[in-house]
Structures are given as C-alpha cells and as structure tokens.
Image: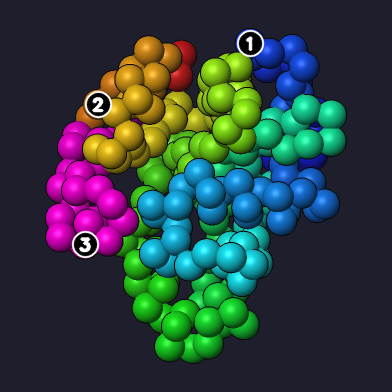
Amino acid sequence: MTPADISETPQYDTSIRLLDHLPDDLVDDAAALYLSALADKLIPVYGAGPRARRALACGFNRPMCITAMEKDRLVGILGIQTAAAGFMDVTVNTLQPFYGTLGSLWRMALLVFLNHSPMADEAYIDGVVVSPSYRGRGVGSGLIAALEAWATGQGLSIVCLEVVDANPRAENLYRRIGFETVREQTVWPVGTLFGFRSSTVMVKVLT
C-alpha cells in the first residue's frame, strides 16, 4: 500500500477519514489503543504500561493497516496480515531491547500460538480496534469496508478473521456484515491464559 487518504470508502460517520497506513506521529497512540482494546490477548505477552506500549509499537509494520482519524486524532485501527506481510511484524529482535533474550523467547512462543498464517488469496484482520468514545458511530464497519476495497485492489478474494468466545457481540456484528463461520477451534488450556477457551474463524468472500 502507498500512503493515501481513502476517505471515499463507504462509512457511516462523515467526520471520520480513513488512511491506508499508520502515520509516524501516531505510532505510540496506536500502541496504547491496541493494548487497551486487545488487553486479553496482548497483556499476557507484553504486560502493561510504557514498556509494553514501546515494545508493541516497535513491531508495527505501518503500511499494513487502515487507520480512522478525526482531524489529527487516531480513533480506530485495523491491522492487516497477508501471506506476504503483516501489521504485527514481531521478532525476537524487536522484543529483545525491552525484555532481554529469555523474556523475548517465551513471549515469541505465546505470539506463535496466536498467529494465523493467511492463504495466498486472503487478507486477515489482525485486530480491529476503535476508541471507546467512537464506538457505535460506524468506525469499525468503515474500517472493514476499507479493508475489503483494499483486498479487492490487491487481487485477494477472501477476508478472514477470528473472534473469541468471550466476544459474542463482535461475532454478531461480523455476521451482519456478511462474514460466515468456517470452523470453531478449542484453545484450552493455553487459551485460558488469554481469557478465552475457543475461537471462531469467519470469512467473507469478496465479489
């Protein structure tokens, strides 16, 4: 993706504009939003506080996302993963400055457990988060619509995501916008560390 304003993508709140990248000056804000909204998954790996935010931000691949902005404020972000690249580009080397060698190794092991390997024709949603004060304004739906448009432009035919059993509200939203369940998978007992026991893989075929 090349940096651009993609505000023409269909959305519900016209005060929100969408970008196909994460601006340099908003990396820290994105890390804080990601860590807060995806706390169940990320805090067991990164912990909380300034060190966790810096470590998370260090692994961001800034072109592989769609961001929602109101003026200069980041209000939502959707991470993208394809077979070629992903938003969460985390390695031992990105973690080591914050956690040391041993701390980085066990954290990578947990991240591998959470990892999804997309197929060649697939765009995977690697987290979609919206600032609490902007929920209910169509920001999340707008981000997903923008991803679908981007994926089509890249020649991809499937959008995929996983939703955990602890978040039935999100699963209902995805069904309303055209996603269908392809499988359910049990992640017990390791998943209990992250606050869920199973996840549902959902896909939407793009036409």
Report how far apart the C-alphas of labels 2 and 1 lie in the structure.
Answer: 25 Å
In the visual, does 187 lie left or right of 124?
left
Residue 101 point in image, percent of width and height: 49, 88
In the visual, does 45 lie left or right of 155?
left
Q: Which residue is mark 1?
A: 12
Report how far apart the C-alphas of labels 2 and 3 lie in the structure.
Answer: 22 Å
Q: Which residue is mark 2?
A: 181
Q: Residue at x 62, y 52 (%)?
A: 32
| Tags 2 and 3 touching, CB below 8 Å | no
Q: Which residue is mark 3?
A: 190
Q: Quadrant of residue 198?
A: top left
| Tags 3 and 1 touching, CB below 8 Å | no
Looking at the rendering, the stretch of residues picked out in magenta corresponds to 183-203
State how many labels appear: 3
Amino acid type at image mark 3: Val
Amino acid type at image mark 2: Thr
